[in-house]
Image: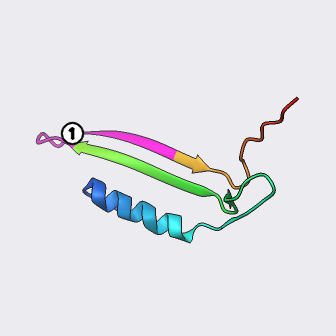
Amino acid sequence: MKSVCSEEEMLAVLEVGERSRSVAATHLNQYSSRSHTLFTIEIIQRYPNQSEKRGKLNLVDLAGSEKVLYDI
């Protein structure tokens, strides 16, 4: 888990993860992913009265899940 306080910090964390991914060419896709990617963004808004609001976004990229379109 990595805590960030700005958009720039979040993008830097995303770039580190992107460099760690494994990709390879297939006959269907030049850059087919060879690893799953899970990225969770949790936003916490804290108020002066000690209450808070939370929101969570989960982004998932499953390796090899590219959609294939066929001409019929």
Residue 10 x %, y %: 35, 58
Quadrant of the image for the C terminus?
Answer: top right
Give the farthest residue toward the top.
72
Residue at image x 64%, y 58%? 36
Please name the predominant secondary structure of the magenta segment in the image.
strand
Please tell me in which quadrant of the rendered image residue 4 appears: bottom left
Residue at image x 59%, y 57%? 37
**Disc 1: which residue:** 51
Classify residue 52 as left or right of residue 11. Answer: left
Quadrant of the image for the N terminus?
Answer: bottom left
Q: Nearer the viewer, residue 1 or 67?
A: 67
Residue 64 x %, y %: 74, 53
Give the farthest residue toward the front.
71
Image: 14 above or below 48 = below
Q: Which residues are magenta?
A: 46-58
Residue at image x 29%, y 59%? 8
Residue at image x 58%, y 48%? 60
Image: 5 above or below 60 = below
Classify residue 38 as left or right of residue 16. Answer: right
Give the farthest residue toward the right.
72
Number of numbered discs overlaid on the protein picture: 1
Which colour assignment does the render follow? Answer: rainbow
Secondary element at tag 1: loop
50 magenta-colored: yes
Q: Amino acid at mark 1?
A: Ser
Q: Nearer the viewer, residue 54 or 57?
A: 57
12 magenta-colored: no
Residue 12 x %, y %: 36, 64
Q: Nearer the viewer, residue 24 or 46?
A: 24
- Whether residue 2 appears in this view of the structure is no
